[in-house]
Image (cartoon, grey):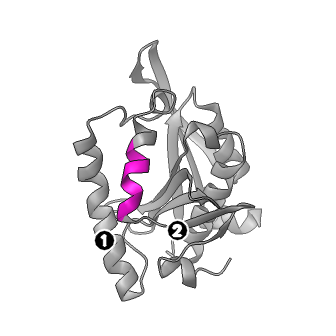
Amino acid sequence: MTYSKLKQGKSVPFHDALTIQLIQPDDLSDIINMLNDDQVNPYLFFAPADDSLYQGFFNPIIENTADAIQQGIWPDSPTFVIRDQQGRYMGMTAITQVMFLQGNHEVGYQLPVHAWKQGIATSACKLMTDIGFNQLNAHKISADCYAANLGSYKTLEKCGYQREGCQVDYYKTEQGFDDKLYYGITAEQFVKNK
């Protein structure tokens, strides 16, 4: 995939019959609906939350994205929304710079239930990883997830990420506690995996 159209904020083909585009203001309601879904938010450390929290988090990203598109550059935190051909929301993904650590980025992806187990997260993770190393000059990309989130860490492993650590009983859940798993890939590992 060439990234010029994606960087311009245009919708481009993605994962068979889907499209992907930099986040737009109209995407926020779909994102909030997903994050408030009781089947999704047990896998997210920041959900459930009040809608104002999500708006406070995403509105600056949306504004920065609009500014970056006008300037022809990548946003500070490239965040993308995935949709099907009918415009149905199929998830979001991002590659974000780690604050104060130049060249370190984090990858993330969240999908609504109807988009699970279709390989979309794997395609999203691969795309974000490629953008991180080939567009943003990352030297390291990391991710973390709940140990119970089998789909998330299997996605990372399919994309060449290595498990780098575990914090035991890190997250308090309704069932007790869950571990936090750490994954990462370096630029060198990425090149070797190609």
**Left or right: where 60 falls relative to 115:** left
**Measuring 27% from the left and 59% from the top, which residue is drawn there?**
59
Which residue lies at the image location 28% right of the left edge and 69% below the top edge? Answer: 63
Who's the residue at 32% across and 63% down the image? 61
Q: Which residue lies under the disc numbered 1?
A: 64
Quadrant location of the C terminus? bottom right
Neighbor class of circle 2 (other Cα within 10 Å; few <14, some 14-19, many 20+) is many
Residue 167 visible to the viewer:
no
Circle 1 SS class: helix
Give neighbour class at mark 1: few <14, some 14-19, many 20+ (Cα, 10 Å): some
Q: Please report whichever mark, 2 or 1, sits nearer to the chain's N-terminal start.
A: 2
Identify whether 76 is placed above or below 105.
Answer: below
Instruction: Name the image quarter holding the N terminus.
Output: bottom right
Whether residue 86 sits left or right of residue 101 in the image: it is right
Q: Position of residue 87 (x, y in %)?
A: 56, 59
Q: Which residues are magenta?
A: 25-32
Image coordinates of residue 126 in percent, x first then y, are 66, 60
Residue that extends furthest to the top in the rendered view of this protein: 175
| Of 83 and 183, the residue lying toward us | 83
Q: Is residue 179 visible?
A: yes
Estimate the spatial distance between the alpha carbons at disc 2 and disc 1, rounded to whole Å. 15 Å
Vertical placement of residue 107 versus 112, above or below: below
Q: Element at badge 2? A: strand
Marks 2, 1: nearer the viewer: 2
Tell me which amino acid carries mark 2: Gln
The x and y percentages for residue 43 are 49, 32
On the image, the x and y values in percent for residue 92 come to 51, 54
* Magenta region includes residue 96: no
Kindly identify the amino acid type of the residue bearing the numbered disc 1: Asn
Instruction: Give the residue at mark 2.
Output: 21
